[in-house]
Amino acid sequence: MTALTIDLQDGFMDDSVIIRVDGDLVLEDDHVSTRLQTGFARSVQCDTAGSAVTVEIELPGRGQQTTIGIDPHDTAYLGLSLDAGGHIASRVSGSMFGYL
Amino acid sequence: MSDLEDIVEEGRETEDLEAIPLPYRVPMWPTLVRASGLYTWSAPIMGPLPRPRWPSPILPIPEMPTNVPRPGPQPDPVPVTDEADGNLSADGDESMLYPVWFLYEEMRLDVDGLYPQMVASGTVKRSMSTRVHWVANLTARGHNRWVGSIWYKDGNATSFPYTNIEIRAALSWFPNQRRITAVFSGGGAPVRRRTYKYKSPYYHSVEFEYDRVAGATQVSRINTAEHPNHPATLPTEKLSIETVFKRAGFDVRKSRGDGEVPISGAHANATWSDMEMHDAMQTYWSRFRNQAQWSMWTLFAGRHDQGHSLGGIMFDDIGPNHRQGTAIFSDSFISDAPAGDINPTAWVSRMRFWTAVHEMGHSFNLAHSWQKAHPPSWGTPWIPLANENEVRSFMNYPYRVSGGQTAFFADFDYRFSDSELLFMRHAPARFVEMGNADWFDHHGFQQADVLAEPKFSLDLRVNREKAVYEFLEPPVLELKLTNISRQPQLIDDDVLSAGEEMTVIIKKRGKTARQRIPYVRYCAESPKIALAPGNAIFHSLFAAVGRNGWDLAEPGVYSIQVALHLEDEDIVSNALRLQVAPPRGYEEELIAQDFFSDEVGRILTFEGSRVLEKANDTLREVCERLGDRRVAVHARMALANPLTRDYKLLNIGEKGTRALTSVHAAKGEFIIASADKDEARTGLDKALTDDATAAVETFGHINYKRFIDRYSDWLATSGDAEAAGKCQRLLRNTLAKRKVADWVLAQIDKRCEIYVKKVTSKVKKTA
C-alpha cells in the first residue's frame, strides 16, 4: 500500500469539495477555505494500491470537475488549487508540500 | 548602501557596527548624501483655528479606485518653471485650494539609495477626518530634480486635484538643512508649491519584538555567505532581520529584549494553535494593544498544530486588529535540508531566517508573490497587481520557482520585490500598518497622529460580558481617557462629552466605514481640570445614530473606533467589535421600519421629546409589542423623561406651516405643557427600577447612574426623599454586583446620606 496525500491549496473560498480516488470517496467537505497567509486549506490522506490511480475532484458549487491520473510511487503528494478564473489546477511532488 | 554609510550619515551608533564585514566598502564623497527619505511640512498656527459651524461632511473611506492606470512609465508632464514667480504660489498662500487650517503634510521621496522606486508619495492632512494620500512616478530631469505624474490618490481626492509634480532637492551634509520643494500642477487648480524639511532617511518607523518558546530555535541573523549557493554579487555580511527591513525603508527598533515563552503555553502535545499563539501574544508582547500601531511580535516556536508541513504563519487574522503577530516553527520542513545539500546546517539556518522575514512580511500586509492578481472575493489589492511567480523575493516560496530552491537562492539578494517595496514605502500607511487594515484588505481607519510616547490612552468598551446587542437595542458604549504619563495633565473637563474634537468611525463587516456625525456639538467655555497620573475620566457614547443616520442598526458585526484630538496629540482608542443580533420575528422587522428614523434617533439621543409625536407613537408601540426587549427600556425612558417637568413648546399655529414665515409674523408663542408627574414616575420606575439588571445592562454603568441620579434628585425635590434614597440604594446594589469601582459606590453612599438627612428632617418637622 502506498500513501497518497492530497492538499487543497490556493483559491478555495468556502467551497464544497468532493474527492474520489479510484471511485472511493476520500473527502466531502462543504466548507473548504484557503488561509491566504499560508496558501493551504486542508489535507487528506488515503492508501492506494500503489499503481496508477485516478483522482476525481468535483466542486459542485462552481460546476467544476476534473480527473487526474497519478502514480503514487513517484508522486505521493498532489496539490490542488483554484486559479483566478476558478479552474482547478494541480501539481505533484515526491515530497511533502511546505507552507509558510 | 552599506551599514557604514548609514552610520556616517546619521551620526549615530548602531549595534550593526559588529556586523560590518572586512573589507568594507568605503563610501565615496559626496554620494553619502541622499535625497530619498521622509520630509514634512506644517503650517504655522497664527491664531485660533477657525472651527466649522457644522461637523465636517461625511467622508466614507473609498473603495479602491478602479479607473486608476497601472503604475508604470508615464508621459513626462510639462515641467512647471519656477522662474516666473507670478505663476506660482508661495508656501502658505491662501489662494491655494486648502484653507488656512491645513496643518501637516508628509512626502516620501524615493529616488536614490537602496532599491529606489523612482516614486514620490505624500499625505496631506487637513484634520483628523480629512486627508488625501497621493503617489507619483518620477523621472530625473537634471541634478536633484525630478518630474512626474500623480497616478494614485486615496481619501478626499476632490480636495487634491493635481496631476503633475516637479521636485527639486536642496541637499546638505547636515540633515536639518536639507529641503525639497514640490510644485503641484494640473487638474484645473492653481499651481501649488510646498517646501518640505527633511525628517528621516526612512519612510516609516516600526518596532519588532521577538520571543522564543523554550526548546525552539531562534534565527534572527545569518551569515549570507555561509551557504555556497548564492549570487556572486551578494555582499558577505552578518545580516539581521532588522537590516532587511531597514533596507526596505523602515526605521526598525526593538521594543524589548528577546525573551522566552514557557512551553506550558501550548497544549499537551507541545504544538501550537493559532488561538494559543494569540493568547501568548497578548501575554508576552510588551506592546500588545487592541489598536493599530507600527509594532509587531514574532514567536520562534517548535511546531504548529498543522504539523511538519507548516514552517511559519502570520497567525493574527482574528479579532479587530490583524497582522500584529507571526510565528516560525523550527520543528517543521524548514529544518529539513535537501538530501545531498553541500552545507545542510547553513541551509537550515538560511531557511529559518528567510521564513522569519517572510512571515513578518505578511504582517506588513504583503501577499505571496503568486497571489497578487486574484478575484475580489479574496480581498482588495491597493492597486491592480500582477502575479510574480518567478520573482526572487522574501514573499515567494523558494521551491515554487522554476528550478526549485536551488535556482531561487542562486539568484536571491535578500530583498523584497519592487512592487512590494512600492507598497511598503508608498501605500497609504493604514494599508501597511500592523493592526490597521484587515489581513488582505486595504480598508482601515487611521485618522490621527499618535505620539510615540502618548500621554493618554483612550479605551472604548461596553459594560457587558459580550458585546452583543438585541435587534433594535441601541448600543451604548463607554469611553475612558486615562493619563498614562508621569505628570499631571491639563484637559478640558468636557473633552469627552462635548464631542468637539472627537471622531467616531463605524464599520460594518463587508461595508465601507462611516464617520458618525453627532446631532449636536457643544460650544462652551470649558474649565480645565488636572488629571493626575493614572487617573481617568469617563463618558458614555451613544454611537448608534447621528445626523447621517443609523449606523448601528442592521444585524451584523461592527468595528468601532474613536479618535480624540487634544492640544498636541491625537489619541486613538482600541477598535471595539460588537455584534447586532438578527430580529427574532416579524414584529421586530415591522417596527424597525419606523424605529430607524431620524426622529426616533433624535428622541433617543436627547432622551425625550414632547414635539416629535410620530416618533413617540413608535416608541409607545415598542413598549406595547416588544415590552420584554431591551429596546423597550430605552423607549420607556425617552417617553417618561420629558414628563418630569413643565415643558416649553413653541406654538406657531397654522400660519407657521407656510414656508419662510417668521415666528413673529405667524404670531408664534411659547406655551407650557405641564409636567405629568404620575405618568413620569410610572414610566421611569418601569424603565429604571423595576428591572434594574436589564436597565444597567442596556444603558451601561455611566448612563444608568446618571439616569438614577437625575430620577432620585427629581423624587427628592418632588417631596419624596425616601423614594430617592431607595433608588440610590438600588443603584448601589446593582453596580456593586457588577464590581464597579469603590469610589463610585462611595459617591452613591454620599448621595444616600443627603436623602436620609432630608427624610430625617422631614420627619422632625412633621413631629
Image: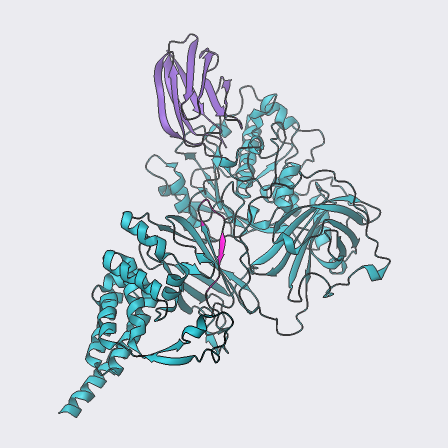
Chain colours: A purple, B cyan
B518 falls in the magenta region: yes
Quarter of the picture holding the C terminus of chain B: bottom left
Q: Which residue is situated farthest in the left direction here?
A: B767
Q: Residue at x 72, y 62 (%)?
A: B96
Residue B368: which quarter of the image? top right
Measured from the top left, where is residue A70 in percent x and y? 46, 12
Question: Where residue B60 appears, x then y in whole percent?
Answer: 53, 53
Q: Answer whether residue B40 is magenta in the image.
A: no
Instruction: Please state the extent of the stretch shown in magenta in the rendering.
Output: B508-519
Name the residue: 36% across, 28% down. Answer: A30
View extreme (right): residue: B83
Q: Is residue B454 above or below residue B80?
A: below
Horizontal side, residue B725 vs residue B135: left or right: left
Q: Is residue B201 above or below residue B235?
A: below
Q: Who is closer to the viewer here, B309 or B346?
A: B309
Q: Is residue B696 among the parts visible in the rendering?
A: no
Q: Quadrant of residue A23?
A: top left
Residue B762 point in image, percent of width and height = 19, 88
Measured from the top left, where is residue B412 in percent x and y? 65, 31
Along the line of sight, the residue nearer the viewer: B240 or B58? B58
Quarter of the image with the N terminus of chain B is top right
Q: Is residue A67 left or right of residue B400?
A: left
- Is B529 displayed left or right of B224 in the figure? left
Q: Who is closer to the viewer here, B390 or B666? A: B666
Task: State whether residue A22 appears in this view.
Answer: yes
Of B184 and B205, the residue lying toward us: B184
Residue under the point 61% across and 54% down: B156
Q: Main secondary structure of the magenta part?
A: loop
State the image quarter where residue B414 is shown: top right
Q: How many labels were placed on the picture? A: 0
